[in-house]
Image (cartoon, grey):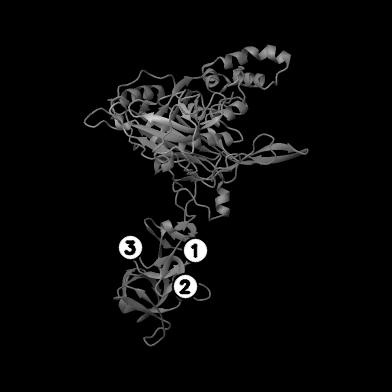
Amino acid sequence: MYVSDPPCVPPQPPAQISDDTLAPLKNWCHPFKDKTNPLLQLTQMANAVAGYYPLGRNGLWHGGVHFDGGTAATLDQSSVHGLADGEVVAYRIDEHSPTTTYVVEQLCVPKPFSRNFVLVRHRLVAPEIEGSPDEPPSLTFYSLYMHLRDWAVYRHDPSISRPAFWPEGLSGHVKATAGDTLPGHPREQGLKVYNQAQHGKALGLLSPGTPVTVSGKGEFRKLENTHGPDRLKSADGSLLGYLHIDYLAHIAGDEYRIKANPSLRVRAEANISSTILMELPHGTEVTASGEGAFRKLERVNQYVHFDSLDGVREPIADRIVVLDQPIAIKAGDLIGHMGTYQNGDAEHPETKLHLEAFSADCVESFIETSRAWAQRLPITGKTWLKLAKGTTLVMHQAHFSATYPPSLNEANTLSDADLLVPDSLLNGLPAENKITIAATADRKTCHWYRLDGLLHDANGTLLDGWLREEVGITPRVNPWSWEGYDVIFNDDAPGQSLASFFRAVGQFSEGELERHGDLADKSDKGPLKSRLYDIIDRDRDGNMTAAELQSAIGLPAHAQSLAQLIVHYESEWRHTPP
């Protein structure tokens, strides 16, 4: 996360009342609904081709993370989903992405760059303290999803699911998953067509994929692209049949409502003895023409279940849409799909998502207030196990069991960085990877956990083995204490960052080194680079490259430390013409 506000004001007491009406978020979700443990989710970012946080491959500030062809091998990136409960406040979906001209084999070739985005606002609120009137600290933040798919792709392929926050359109098709059946036809599945919007009776069945046009509001919508049931249609689409006027209640003009219990017969001809084509249930709305006892049937109003249709939502295209009334969204709801973006001189545009979280609130004040609040929360809220640097990891042996548990006297290795492990991860371990030793008169309860590939040693090698939690001794923390988080005020200008990067990768000549060395020094000695050097510059050579950053993200402890950096910096998306 980064912060985009002016310098923070002094912290406010937690009792201050907020007038924010946005409901507090309760649920979180991975953008691709990945179920891997959260620590390994962080390390997935190391697989990205580029776009790391907080520096890109070019050494410049990068306020988000990329999902691209590199992460596709481990994630199902077929659709993008919301990170947390919140509300959509703005979006842009172009009909076709704009292009940039590149020279390919001496030819000018236009390459697309998707600028489509969705912006979601969230409100993070600490848990209330039972019996206390004090207002919990809260933070408003945003998640931004960039480089999404063009509207033309959806128009071309109606089977692609569309986000629920797009405005409702008129045209769509029956979902492939529609599974309604009619009596006597159990093998035919589709979507039932009803005679009324409420408490209707089935008139027929639409096959999956059938194109439809609807109107109205509510759970059931009126079909507009058909005059009535297929059983009554002639070759040109007009309706066959006649209805007796005595069973029609006049509505207006040529419109009537059937008042027959339970149904009214549709006759092939205008007489009582002609063939019965079908029966229309009581309450069906029809249009009929002519004079006399029998009226010619022109239309039968039919209704379908709206949520059983795909492709009936359409964005307002080719402009930034700021919603007058934000639309609520749940964690995991569909945001959209990854679009295409030309990256430099790559041969082909790549499929990419840029994802970031930022806040305009004073995050430093929020964290300070939250830490004080966490001290008042029940001890049961300490759901993170803190494995400090130097934690002993005992190498696994085949005989380890509840009868013969691991011992710190066995062969072991020490970890080289702090790591916070959530209870959800520990509780989800297989039974054979957890051993509990009951308390005695002179010893507290101990839990042994076998953790593979989470801690690393001084050489950056991931470790497998057993670690011990001594209840009441091994430190635990409450998530609301924001353990390990740093707020960094970074004033590293792009020119300084670029000079530092060019020097690190050896792209400067001796003359350029002399001219730009001071700029590079200012970047390297700034607060952000200094903190990054602490985390990832393992060889301590004073240079930081994308390869080192990528390698660090592959280690859960370092990936967690990078994720805990909250940087106060101007967004790279801000456009200033000069």
Q: Amino acid at mark 1?
A: Pro
Residue 1 showing in the rendered view: no
Q: Residue at x 55, y 35 (%)?
A: 45
Residue in front for this viewpoint, 85 or 106: 85
Q: Are marks 1 and 3 in contact (CB under 8 Å)?
A: no
Q: Amino acid at mark 2?
A: Asp
For marks 2 and 1, give the CA distance: 16 Å
Of labels 2 and 1, earlier in sequence is 1
Secondary element type, mark 1: loop
Q: Residue at x 65, y 41 (%)?
A: 349
Q: In the figure, is residue 303 to the left or right of 574?
A: left
Q: Which mark is residue 230?
A: 2
Residue in front for this viewpoint, 181 or 89: 181
Secondary element type, mark 2: helix
Label 2 environment density (alpha carbons within 10 Å; few <14, some 14–19, many ≥20): some
In the orientation shown, which residue stands out farthest toward the right? 106
Q: Amino acid at mark 3?
A: Gln
Residue 122 showing in the rendered view: yes
- 449 up-or-down from 187: above or below: above
- 315 up-or-down from 255: above or below: above
- Residue 151 is situated, as x and y percent measured from the top left of the image, at 55, 48
Of labels 3 and 2, earlier in sequence is 3
- Determine which residue is flagged by label 1: 208
- Residue 265 is situated, as x and y percent measured from the top left of the image, at 36, 79
- Determine which residue is flagged by label 3: 198
Q: In the figure, is residue 197 to the left or right of 512?
A: left
